[in-house]
Amino acid sequence: MDEKMQKLVRQNKGGTFHLFGQGHELIGVVSSQALTPGKDWGFPYYRDRAFAIGLGCALDELFGAFLAREVPHHSGGRMMPEHFSHKELRIPCQSSVVGSQFLQAVGVAKAARLAKTDEVVYVSGGDGSTSQGDFHEALNYACIHQLGVIFVIQDNGWAISVPVHEQTAGGSITHMAEGYVGLAVYPVDGGDYVAILEALDAAMQRGRNLEGPSLIVAKVPRIGPHSSSDDPQKYKTDSHFDEDAKQDPIPRFEEWLLREGHITHEEIEALREKVKEEIEIAAKQAENFPLQKSEHVLDHVYKETHVETIPEQERGEAIVIMDALNHALDEEMERDSGVVIFGQDVAHGKGGVFGITRGLTEKYGEERCFNTPLAESTIVGTAIGMSVHSHFKPVAEVQFSDYVWTGINQLFNELSSFHYRSNGEWNCPVVIRMPSGGYIQGGPYHSQSIEAFLAHCPGLKVVIPSNAADAKMLLKSAIRDPNPVIFLEHKALY
């Protein structure tokens, strides 16, 4: 499939960019066979095409996405190639941002844990992705909550042209990760079928039994360039290419099958010809999918919202905005058991630094109102993951809007675009509350008003109430909205 896609690039048939997966096939295929399609979850990164095919993604749709055609899945041609998305197979829409998938995966796993299911979440990345903070935040969160996540790092030794020893202290991702308490780490040869199978069996057992997360670090060769825009001869030596060829998992797997008597040379050749034929047919069929039409460019920026009206209420007693917000959260948690609240200091007696979530842990339990690490990317990223799991409506709190910037990638690149970039296949009904604004003598880092920035982010709804009555009804409406809503609470109103 790599060879066919690269040929289409050279022929200028519609696909202008190609990401190679050669050398990564075996770990992806074996991983896909360990999961139950439609039950377990997959967050495959861009080299993990073999995983997507093994899980059940149709070849013609993968080619169609590569050709930017309006296929039923994989963003309908809106995204670059190898940005997998398939709701029936539980593959949430992936993005181009390296490492952003890890926190979303643990968010899904947290939701599965709260729902008391034995769903397992698979998430993959390359060695370069382990340099991202989101990777380490995800490992930490998964270990804190002992989540059923299988992290698979396909370590080919290169982040485009940067070798692993310039990415990772000591050059070993395995040694780096062993310090996470509660994480089972399995280093494997990505061309050794038996070793991969044993590691996956152990990791799946841990996931199913809610024993905690696992990390599989598979050493694989990167056969070919990073992408169709890359020339590896600029940074790889002949010895690198020779070693990659020796470690190619496909001929190694063929040799193992022959040695163990599972197949004959004739059967291998027949299978190879059959696969080539299927690839040619799928590539041809992909050209029948229509191209995206320009008049639909603004479709799916927001998911359609059905507004509920309520009878006019008699005037109640006068309360302050902090109580109004607390009452709104309480009433929505009472109405919908899927509403969960989390953030820094929101739980137990503290109830948030302004007391907005006071009493909610005591009333609804630690599973529905709980603390998070001091990590805004974790708060937003896990909220995304929890929201794509159909059981839950996350209402997250960022303690001060001034501090959301460390989570801005998950907010701006991920949360806001999820519905649009998936061509309407997925949506993220997340509410993120943030105290905002000045007038408390807070200096430059407790006084920021960031609504103008947020309002220029397509896909987000931004709410700023000015009084207690509006605050209560707007927060209740935000929680019932199928789109991501940023709810800014001006501190001067507290």
Image (spheres, rainbow, N blue to C red):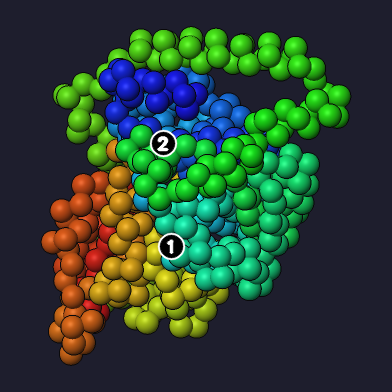
> Is residue 439 shown left or right of residue 224?
left
Among the 4 quarters of the image, the one containing residue 491:
bottom left
- Looking at this rendering, what residue extends furthest in the right direction? 261
Q: Nearer the viewer, mark 1 or mark 2?
A: 2
Local SS, label 2: loop
User: Helix, strand or loop at disc 1?
Assistant: loop
Q: Which quarter of the rendering shows the C terminus? A: bottom left
Q: Is residue 470 left or right of residue 287?
A: left
Residue 353 rendering spot, x and y as whole percentages: 37, 82
Residue at 74% across, 50% down: 199
In the image, 222 versus 356, the foreground residue is 222
Residue 417, above or below 447: above
Crowd tier of the residue under label 2, counting other residues whose Cα lies within 10 Å: few below 14, some 14–19, many 20 or above = many
Q: Residues within 10 Å of mark 1 (few under 14, many from 20)?
A: few
Residue 408 can be seen, yes or no: yes
Residue 189, compared with residue 376, is above or below; it is: above
Q: Looking at the image, which residue sits at the far front?
A: 238
For the point 68% across and 41% down, the residue is 191
- Identified at 44% across, 75% down, the residue is 374
Whole-percent x, y for residue 451 in the image: 17, 63
Closest to the observer, 384 or 11: 11
Q: Which residue is mark 1?
A: 132
Please name the amino acid that badge 1 sits on.
Answer: Gln
The tag earlier along the polypeptide, 1 or 2, is: 2
The residue that disc 2 covers is 19
Write the residue at 25% across / 74% down: 402
- The Cα–Cα distance between marks 1 and 2, rounded to whole angstroms, is 20 Å
> Does residue 316 appear in this view?
no
Q: Position of residue 354 (x, y in %)?
A: 34, 81
Query: 14 above or below 83?
Result: above
User: Do the numbered discs 1 and 2 sit on residues whose CB atoms are within 8 Å?
Assistant: no
Q: Which amino acid is tagged 2?
A: Leu
